[in-house]
Image (cartoon, rainbow, N blue to C red):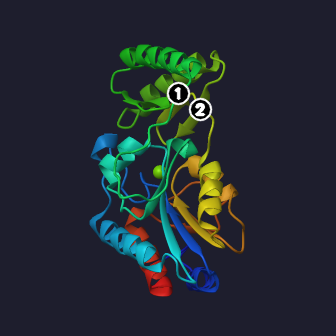
Amino acid sequence: MKLSGDVVLEKEVSQRLKDARRVLVALDFDGTIAPLVARPEDARALPATAALLTQLDDLARDSAGTERPTFVALVSGRDIASLHRVAEPGENSFLVGSHGAELQVPAKVTTPDTAVLTEAQRELLSTVTAQLEAIHALHPGSHLEYKTLSTVLHTRGMEAAGAEAAATAAEEALSALDGVSVKHGKEIVEAAVAHSSKGEGLLWLREQTDADCVLFAGDDVTDEHGFAALETGRDVSVKVGSGETIAEFRISSPDSLPELLQLVLDVRS
Ligand SMILES: [Mg+2]
């Protein structure tokens, strides 16, 4: 495994996972478990990763109630309904959707809890959506994604100048609206009517699991909030791919994730 291409770092990660009594493995989905694709609905876990996630979900089930439990969570900007469709999470995994605004404990029931919007949030979401639909109409090649708590303008696949013009138009339109939380990711502008972050999602997970070591891997700028919620030297923050980060460790792409998950299984099984 190449964690920054450094064997010492691999040893360091193993040691932390070994030393901890209660471990939580939390993973972003798009760009981490699944390679990025043009249409969000087409994203799927790499086969090797999917197989290891099943093993981790079994480990979560088998270690529950023991001295050294290992928990598994998916932490995504997707809403939970969408996460169920593309990620097919195991029934022993926690789910954090909509950047921390939706939370689901492991259950055999696969019907997701739907986040409840207030009347004001509902109205604001339709205003935001109308604005983004107008921008989408003016910028061919852009896509819209409708989520429970937000609407997203995607510019993946557009040529750079057009993508930038669409993103700028979206940011300008959204900045005029009060109460909208705007997130900028890789080729997306997302306008949410609930304020949350992956950091808050991870704090909730730590509270639920009482984990003394949290491993969190993610690829996007919104994952930096997650890394910021971790403790350097004790937890394990892993940036997937290139780009500036505050994470302690890095793997080059979703192709390297199976090796990281195998390491977790080797240490914790
Ligand atoms: Mg991602």
> Sequence-wise, which precedes: disc 1 or disc 2?
1
Q: How many marks?
A: 2
* Residue for badge 1: 117
Judge from the rendering whether residue 164 lies leftward or rightward of residue 206; answer left or right. Answer: left
What kind of residue is marked 1?
A: Leu
Residue 239 versus residue 199 in the image, above or below: below
State the image coordinates of residue 197 (x, y, percent, origin top left): 61, 44
Q: Position of residue 160 (x, y in %)?
A: 44, 33
Residue 101 at x, y = what percent? 56, 41
Q: Residue at x 40, y 60 (%)?
A: 33
Name the residue rendered at 65%, 23% in the picture: 179
The residue lying at 59 percent from left, 49 percent from top is 198
Q: Which mark is residue 194?
A: 2
What is the secondary structure assignment of the residue under circle 2? Answer: loop
**Which image quarter: residue 56?**
bottom left
Q: Is residue 178 above or below residue 268?
A: above
In which quadrant is the C terminus drawn? bottom left
Q: Residues within 10 Å of mark 2 (few under 14, many from 20)?
A: many
Asked whether mark 1 lies closer than 8 Å to ligand 1, one says no
Instruction: Name the kind of residue labelled 2 in the image.
Output: Ala
Does the residue at mark 1 contact the one at mark 2 (Cβ under 8 Å)? yes
Q: From the viewer's side, name the closer residue of 182 and 241.
A: 182
Single out the residue that lies furthest toward the right.
232
| Vertical order, 67 against 57 (above or below) | below
Compared to 237, does 186 lie above or below?
A: above
Q: Nearer the viewer, mark 1 or mark 2?
A: 1
